[in-house]
């Protein structure tokens, strides 16, 4: 993961052990080599649909709270894009993998969703942005890790490819730039660092929980 400023330099050093735990966990390794049990993938994908709806709501809250017009537009674009991905998974991927939609959130996904929504509404704008960044940055780095190790004829390639490409990284770079600028001008720098770390730990718990159906 490349750092781009004072904030990202600090937080990446702090969350690097968590990132290593994520990339060495069974779910990520077995998704990359195609050996992941379908029950585990089903849990993750069906929960991801519900999570994306909540994440889009949190992004919408950021858009409403942003003071700069370009940031308002950016977070609204992210919100709409997240809802499009949710629709794609629901209407195409669930059928492709022969999966049924989940009717309620699991603990790890619900805890993460609640964390994002709470900060998007109750924390300072700068802290809210820092809380939502790992959803894009940590996850994007994990996808890069998986794609670099993905086996040929991987049964999960269709899903893995969803979070790659120039558009995703353009969004990510803009998000990082916004958080970096917020950090430089914020009196909540320590809070920004702490919520980023906490969000990264939520990412780990999601991947760990998704292996439970295989046990």
Image (tube, rainbow, N blue to C red):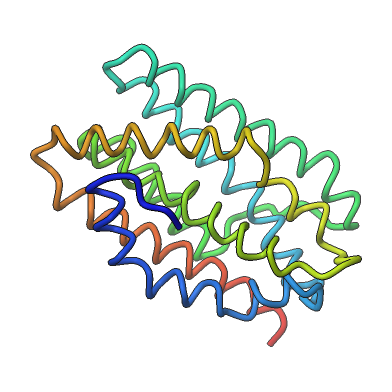
- The answer to whether 46 is drawn above or below residue 36 in the figure is above
Q: Quadrant of residue 18?
A: bottom left
User: Residue 198 in the image: x percent, y percent?
Assistant: 32, 61
- Specify the farthest residue to the top: 69
Tell how many labels. 0
Residue at (82% x, 58% y) in the render: 157
- The answer to whether 165 is drawn above or below residue 108 in the figure is above
Residue at (57% x, 69% y) in the render: 207
User: Residue 15 in the image: x percent, y percent?
Assistant: 34, 66
User: Residue 170 in the image: x percent, y percent?
Assistant: 54, 33
Q: Nearer the viewer, residue 112 or 172?
A: 172
Residue at (30% x, 43% y) in the render: 119
User: Residue 212 in the image: x percent, y percent?
Assistant: 63, 79
User: Left or right: where does residue 63 sit relative to residue 122?
Assistant: right
Residue at (51% x, 41% y) in the render: 54
Q: Quadrant of residue 125?
A: top left
User: Left or right: where does residue 124 sit relative to residue 16?
Assistant: left
Quadrant of the snapshot with the C terminus? bottom right
- The answer to whether 1 is drawn above or below residue 119 in the figure is below
Quadrant of the snapshot with the N terminus? bottom left
- Specify the farthest residue to the left: 187
Q: Quadrant of residue 16?
A: bottom left
Q: Nearer the viewer, residue 47 or 182?
A: 182
């Amino acid at each position: 993961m490349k750092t781009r400023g004072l904030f990202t330099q600090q937080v990446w050093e702090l969350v690097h052990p968590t990132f290593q735990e994520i990339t060495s966990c069974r779910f990520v390794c077995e998704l990359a080599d195609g050996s992941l049990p379908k029950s585990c993938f089903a849990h993750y994908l069906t929960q991801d649909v519900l999570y994306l709806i909540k994440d889009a709501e949190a992004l919408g809250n950021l858009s409403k709270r942003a003071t700069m017009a370009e940031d308002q537009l950016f977070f609204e674009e992210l919100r709409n894009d997240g809802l499009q991905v949710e629709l794609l998974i629901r209407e195409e991927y669930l059928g492709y993998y022969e999966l049924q939609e989940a009717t309620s959130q699991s603990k790890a996904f619900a805890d993460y969703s609640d964390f994002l929504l709470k900060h998007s509404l109750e924390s300072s704008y700068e802290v809210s942005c820092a809380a939502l960044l790992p959803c894009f940055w940590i996850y994007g780095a994990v996808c890069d890790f998986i794609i670099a190790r993905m086996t040929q004829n991987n049964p999960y390639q269709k899903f893995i490819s969803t979070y790659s490409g120039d558009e995703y990284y353009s969004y990510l770079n803009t998000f990082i730039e916004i958080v970096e600028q917020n950090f430089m001008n914020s009196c909540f720098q320590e809070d920004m660092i702490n919520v980023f770390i906490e969000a990264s730990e939520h990412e780990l718990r999601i991947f760990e929980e998704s292996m439970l159906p295989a046990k």
